[in-house]
Amino acid sequence: MRNISVFSLIFIIVLGCSESKEELINKIENSRKEIFEKPTKDIDVNIAKTLIKEYQDFIDKFPMDTNVAIYLFQQAQIYKSIGEIENSIKAWEVICEKYPDSKLAAKSLFLQGFTYENDLKIIIKAQQKYSLFLEKYPNHVLAESAKFSLANIGKPTNQIIQEFEAKSTQKDSMVN
């Protein structure tokens, strides 16, 4: 009998210390408001890190919840906004691996390529991600952007502009 009451006491303590789904969602929403409703564009890094932790707490406690892919995506955006680029890529990778049916999986894969290309300047990784994106999502709205990025990756901006102008001039001469 004593074992049952000790077990019951431990269960009540654990249950009392655990935050409910609604409480975590409220904490996340409050932190988001604190970050995004400020008149300045600068993000408070401390609040951002708190929000990242709140997202992670929710993800860890409710991994099958329909909000997880959304929270991972938002977490990746926050990581990127505070300069933690590698962590943003990791969050997008988790979406692609654990939640491949999410509406955010395609965008997450594209953003990995974009981030490798533009932020980390790791061209081979960018090419791999863009290629995988086109293989998995050939009809996605971002497919043309992925094709353009693959075709122009590593080229200086002025070269891309010159090539674009040359194609435009060529089309104009064909019309006339």
Image: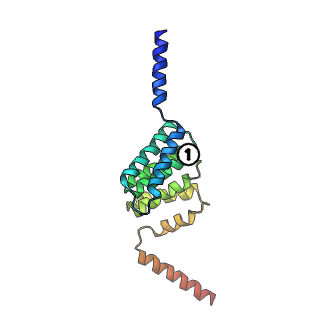
Task: Residue at the far bottom: name it.
Answer: 176
Measuring from the top left, give residue 138's x and y in whole percent.
Answer: 59, 59
Q: Quick one: 29 or 131, which is closer to the camera?
A: 29
Disc count in the image?
A: 1
Q: Position of residue 76 (x, y in %)?
A: 45, 52
Q: Which residue is nearer to you in this view: 82 or 1?
A: 1
**Vertical placement of residue 168 versus 19, above or below:** below
- Residue under label 1: 67
Residue 18 visible within the image: yes
Name the residue located 41 percent from the left edge and 58 percent from the top edge: 81
Q: Residue at x 41, y 68 (%)?
A: 154
Q: Residue at x 45, y 40 (%)?
A: 57
> Residue 78: image x %, image y %?
43, 54
Q: Is residue 148 left or right of residue 88?
A: right
Residue plotted at (46% across, 10% down): 2
Which image quarter is the C terminus in? bottom right
Q: Is residue 63 visible?
A: no
Where residue 141 sits, quadrant-wise, is: bottom right
Q: Secondary structure at mark 1?
A: loop
**What residue type is disc 1 on?**
Asn
| Residue 164 location (% of width, % of height) | 50, 79
**147 up-or-down from 8: above or below:** below
| Nearest to the observer: residue 103 or residue 83 | 83
- Is 172 situated above or below 133? below
